[in-house]
Image (spheres, rainbow, N blue to C red):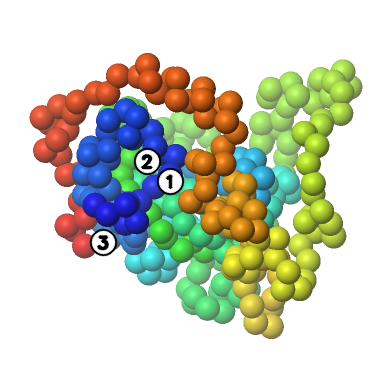
């Protein structure tokens, strides 16, 4: 497979070379990684009730979270686009905040009860107001409970879709409703949401104020701001939808320049070269001690649950 056509990052390609797994990785890329959702993937997404979401801000600070809803709460708009609702939540808006700076995200859906298989979806996100989403896509469900009513939607332009193997996924069973009790979805009752389960609030008077490493945050001054054409990172797409319902537009930071490419850099292509030398040296020493593993005959012949030949 030509270098420029290989999915994945420069970092994973470097590790593949050091561990001798490039051929095996190329077989996976060729058989399993799509740039769209095939028919089986679309059917899988449409029946899921939860997923795990990964985002990062323009500095690379990461956040992972959980999203859930009734089957079909993640909408497949077409084979290259899906959308999911954002509810009221705790008001922190960590994921949306990250997307406002860096539109790249990763989604992992796992079916623990039926097929015991997972699906990775990576792509570029765009935040859309609920009323704009409903104007563009008729038939979206409306829930009368405020805590279960979408305030925003995130649409995802699919760039990579591929399987998460079943090897270590536990097989779970749903507990009947009469045994588990009513779910508190949409409630604002602190106790029903879990209260201070981990005791963090109880420690608040004893711990020093939360501090993060010093860094420039000038791009956040004034919150989401009107786009002046001078994006934090040139070439990024607007996060919020346009039209009459458009709110403040903030150009999203591309993931590539967030890893150190300056005005003359090429972004992602310079990622490995511009890593801190001490860190890269440590990685090299670890990889030098690692032993490549040959795939079994069974692994070599398996083409996968979401076989790209399905569409």
Residue at screen point 44% across, 52% down: 122
Label 1 neighbour load within 10 Å: few <14, some 14-19, many 20+: few
Give above or below for 262 relative to 112. below
**Residue under pointer 1:** 9
Residue 175, percent across and down? 41, 32
Mark 3 to mark 2 CA distance (whole Å): 29 Å
User: Residue 243: percent from the left, percent from the top?
Assistant: 65, 82
Q: Is residue 159 left or right of residue 216?
A: left
Q: Position of residue 98 (x, y in %)?
A: 65, 51
Rendering coords of residue 9 (x, y %): 43, 46
Q: CA distance from mark 2 to mark 1?
A: 6 Å
Q: Which residue: 34% across, 56% down?
A: 4
Residue where numbered disc 3 is placed: 39
Left or right: where 110 falls relative to 266: left
> Upstream in the sequence, badge 3 or badge 2?
2
Q: Residues within 10 Å of mark 2 (few under 14, many from 20)?
A: some
Foreground label between 3 and 2: 2
Q: Are marks 2 and 1 in contact (CB under 8 Å)?
A: yes
Looking at the rendering, which quadrant does residue 146 occupy? bottom right
Q: Is residue 238 above or below residue 187?
A: below
Q: Secondary structure at mark 1?
A: loop
Crowding near the residue tagged with mark 3, few <14, some 14–19, many ≥20 C-alpha atoms within 10 Å: few
Instruction: Inspect this view and state whether residue 80 appears.
Output: yes
Residue 13 has which mark? Answer: 2
């Amino acid at each position: 497979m030509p270098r420029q056509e290989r999915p994945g990052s420069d970092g994973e390609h470097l590790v593949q070379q050091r561990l001798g797994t490039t051929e095996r990785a190329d077989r996976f890329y060729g058989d399993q990684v799509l740039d769209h959702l095939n028919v089986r993937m679309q059917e899988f997404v449409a029946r899921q009730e939860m997923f795990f979401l990964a985002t990062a801000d323009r500095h690379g600070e990461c956040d992972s979270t959980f999203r859930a809803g009734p089957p079909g709460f993640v909408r497949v708009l077409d084979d290259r686009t899906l959308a999911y609702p954002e509810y009221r939540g705790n008001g922190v808006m960590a994921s949306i905040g990250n997307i406002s700076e860096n539109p790249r995200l990763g989604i992992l859906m796992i079916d623990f009860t039926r097929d015991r298989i997972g699906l990775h979806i990576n792509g570029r996100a765009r935040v859309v107001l609920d009323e704009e989403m409903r104007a563009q896509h008729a038939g979206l469900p409306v829930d009368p409970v405020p805590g279960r009513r979408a305030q925003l939607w995130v649409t995802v332009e699919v760039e990579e879709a591929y399987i998460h193997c079943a090897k270590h996924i536990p097989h779970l069973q749903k507990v009947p409703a009469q045994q588990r009790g009513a779910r508190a979805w949409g409630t604002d009752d602190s106790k029903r949401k879990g209260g201070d389960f981990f005791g963090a609030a109880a420690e608040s008077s004893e711990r020093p104020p939360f501090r993060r490493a010093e860094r420039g945050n000038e791009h956040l001054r004034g919150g989401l701001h009107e786009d002046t054409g001078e994006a934090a990172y040139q070439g990024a797409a607007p996060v919020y939808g346009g039209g009459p319902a458009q709110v403040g537009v903030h150009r999203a930071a591309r993931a590539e320049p967030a890893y150190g490419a300056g005005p003359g850099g090429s972004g992602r292509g310079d990622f490995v070269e511009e890593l801190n030398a001490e860190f890269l040296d440590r990685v090299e020493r670890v990889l030098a001690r690692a032993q490549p593993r040959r795939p079994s005959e069974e692994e070599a012949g398996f083409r996968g649950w979401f076989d790209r030949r399905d569409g």
